[in-house]
Amino acid sequence: MTVETSANTPVQGGAGVRPEDIAKAIAGPNSPHPQAQPAAHAAQNVQVAPEQKPLPEDVLKKNKAASMLDGAAASVMESASSGYATPFAIALNASTSQIGLLTGISVLLGSLAQPIGASLAERVDRRKIIVSMVVLQALAWLPIAAIPFFLAPGNGAATAFIALFALMTVFGSISAPVWNSTMADIIPLKERGAFFGRRKEFLQFVTLVTLFAFGLFLGVVPKDMVFLGFAAIFAIAFSARMISAHYLNMTFYPPYHHRKDSGSISAFLSGLLSTNFGKLALFLAAIVFATNIAAPFFQVYLLRSLGYTYQLYAVMIAINAIAAILTFSYWGRLSDTFGNKKILFATGLLVPLVPLGYLFASSPLHIAIAEAVSGIAWAGFNLATFNYVLEFSPSYNRARYIAYYNVLIGTATFAGALAGAYLIESNFVLAGLAGIPLLFAISTAARFACIIAILPAVADSKPLPGLDNRRFFVNAVINYPMNEVHSSVVSGWSSMMHAEKKAVETTKRFVGEFGKHAHHGGKAFKRRFYLEE
């Protein structure tokens, strides 16, 4: 799970969209907790990064629009990457361990490349870095699409794909910390929840449509022409990323501020146990490791172990994405009101239910429920993570600190995927479980352990006395949604009854008017045709 980039590369939580990378503070009579007020950021032990001078309103508006359009195009590319890289590897006859390495190596190398981008940001214009790397990332899709036409399916083709996919990821990763620092400088702190919530909601919708469309398309392509189908999808990914580069080039980039006396890797490492940013990074690294023990193998489980068709696979992806779309704004409102830590706790307790659901699933319905939980949980978790990282990272050298953070996260991702692949290849058995089901069980336990044992050390920038995590979990997962549903039903019923009353009144008026005109019209008719007595 990296900090959200313009390509919105998230971590895999299930078979669908990999959840990563928010809305207005709750207000109005339907607020689930209207009396709660955000606490000041100057909590005693919470250090929050100072903010850059706000941009003029017209410049900010144009940048927001460009970011929306860039993100939409990038989401189309990300749909090909997150949704169909593994199916492509399966079609190339990649082994299970190779599929695990596909995720692990690309994320590891990508994270190791991020300090390069952070270092470049201190000497080169941020626009040049981002646009040039995004163009190179787009171009990398072309040789990927050509692999099966030059190499027969097997170990060689799979290895070539892993290498090219990693290269594509590296190009995008170099731009990631630069893009994150740019967005932190562009979007004011008080607007981030609202803006990124709307942005994620919009991008998730684009992702949903493209993921589902790609799956349906592959489903109708004859099996002997499936590589032509993948080539078409990857060609669309190339075109979409080039469009993304266009809008990134249209963005206004504020001057980048950094300190020469800070931002070293040693300063980052020494603060892992003492600073808010360091403690957050350690927690996220732990949860990413626990997640990626199983995450790279969800798609393998569906397509290879359960034998799902591309159409059914696309349905599962759609369920995941729809659940995320429907809950982004909800988690965003809660995040702006109650703070990010409580969102991490509430969604963190839902995250382990995804592999647990897969472990006990015996029908597509059970998988669909697990995917719905995945979309809901990761939508809130990654939203809170993104806001937290921007909040706790220093505005000076932010790109460098985010790059170091992503190196840590990438290492954890690689280690988790490697551990999962090792357990599969070694035929390790525990409590009667082996293979991918064993990974689901281990990942479930590890995720719970991270939330219970490590998350409490992360500082809460919006402490609310009298509202503990357990009470908030019950409210966020059960009470608040039920209240919103009840309010919607009552409001809908009242609107329906009001509309029905107006319809009855209108009908009576119409009948009365019609009868009156019919009476006068009948008399005129009789007169016209001499029918009156």
Image: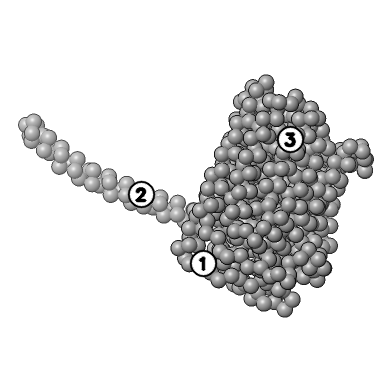
Q: Nearer the viewer, residue 17 or 445?
A: 17
Q: Secondary structure at mark 2?
A: helix
Residue at image position (67%, 22%) is 223
Q: Is residue 423 left or right of residue 294?
A: right
* Rendered location of residue 521, percent (x, y): 15, 39
Q: Nearer the viewer, residue 282 or 442?
A: 282
Q: Report, in whole angstroms, how far the alpha carbon at label 3 lies from the one at label 1.
A: 43 Å
- Identify the amino acid type marked 2: Val
Q: Report, in whole angstroms, how far the alpha carbon at label 2 lies from the one at label 3.
A: 66 Å
| N-terminal-most mark, 1 or 2 | 1
Say which mark, if any, is on residue 292.
none
Q: Nearer the viewer, residue 88 or 146?
A: 146
Q: Secondary structure at mark 3?
A: helix
Q: Is residue 522 in sight in this rendering?
A: yes
Image quarter for residue 209?
top right
Residue at image position (6%, 31%) is 530
Q: Nearer the viewer, residue 295 or 237?
A: 237
* Rendered location of residue 148, percent (x, y): 70, 27
Read off the residue under disc 1.
Answer: 55
Q: Residue furthest front?
A: 123
Q: Are marks 3 and 1 in contact (CB under 8 Å)?
A: no
Say which mark, if any, is on residue 161.
3
Q: Is residue 328 left or right of residue 445?
A: left
Read off the residue under disc 2.
Answer: 504
Image quarter for residue 104?
top right
Q: Report, in whole angstroms, how far the alpha carbon at label 1 lies from the one at label 2.
A: 54 Å
